[in-house]
Image (tube, rainbow, N blue to C red):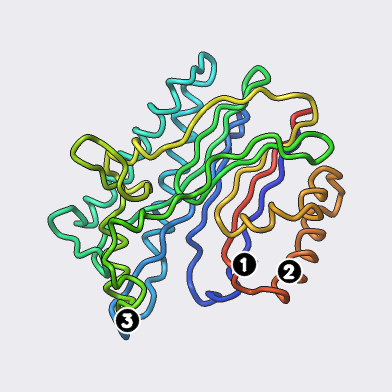
Amino acid sequence: MKVFSTIKQSFFQQKRPQEDYLFFSKKYPIFTVADGVTLVPKGGQKYPDPSSAGIVAEIFCKKVVLEAEKKYKNFKTKNLKEIFKTANKAVADYNAFCRRTKKTINYLDIDLFSTTTAFILIKEKKAYWWSLCDSGIILLDKFGKQIFASPSFSPINGKFLPKNWKKMDPIKRAKIMHSFRNKLGEKGELLGYGVVDGNEAALKYLNFGVIKLNNRDLAIIYTDGFEHYLKINEFNKIFIDWPVNLEQRIDVLSDKKIKENKVKYGLERSLIAICAD
């Protein structure tokens, strides 16, 4: 099994601290990434460094791998939810330590610290996976054909938003958007979007499952900054070829794409690629 990982800094936010995090086990093929949700400081305040969103991403990833290692030898699909719940609780504890609770937050500068996530554990030719929000996974065969992708991020249904949503002040929009985090209806229906913030409702938004792996299949878990890259055949082919200078090849292509479109290709981004030999 070959493994490659990388975190790239945002083209736009070079003065901001890292909020992506990735981690994997040294004992077993267990891998996870997380993307701390960008904070909203008060006007005139500097962006916090270190960022608690980045800290939460690290806390979550490390707890996930630790718990997955404990369960690896007898791993079952049900363990995915168990691991997620335990790591989500660790985030809840951190938010509580920082005095961030449902009663104290304003959904803006004082809000729950949170993160998106994707995860893969490989055992006996099977990949146990999850994805939440806009972090995800894809699976490519040895020819580079995509044979699986986790569900894409679904934005909030427009019927739940104010009619003048697009013309609203950005701060008001952000507050409303954050209020839909892990939101459930009276019957448990999904009304918003899911992230890891310590809220038990996050589990309702979790996508998860099991995929059968064949020799030389390539699994990639990523944060949203790599989403558009993974739609480019030239990018995916780099991993299929798996050259000695893999990192350099990625950087060359990245520089090229950022010049074409800074918004699509210049965000902070993390990725772990795993080739099943």
Image side of residue 101 versus residue 88, left or right: left
Q: Relative to residue 183, is residue 277 depicted above or below?
A: above
What's the residue at 21%, 56% (across, down)?
100
Is label 1 in a helix, a strand or a loop?
Answer: helix
Residue occupied by mark 1: 264
Q: Residue furthest top?
A: 74
Image side of residue 53 versus residue 225, left or right: left
Q: Relative to residue 53, is residue 137 depicted above or below?
A: above
Q: Are marks 3 and 1 in contact (CB under 8 Å)?
A: no
Judged by depth in the image, the label closer to the viewer, 2 or 3, is: 2
Quarter placement of the C terminus: top right
User: CA gap, disc 2 to disc 1?
Assistant: 8 Å
**Sequence order check: which comes first, mark 3 or mark 1?**
3
Give the amino acid type for the residue marked by disc 1 in the picture: Lys
Q: Are marks 2 and 1 in contact (CB under 8 Å)?
A: yes
**Sequence order check: which comes first, mark 2 or mark 1?**
2
Q: Alpha-carbon neighbours of circle 1 within 10 Å: few (<14), some, or many (≥20)?
A: some
Q: Which mark is residue 257?
A: 2
Residue 2 location (% of width, % of height): 76, 36
Residue occupied by mark 3: 45
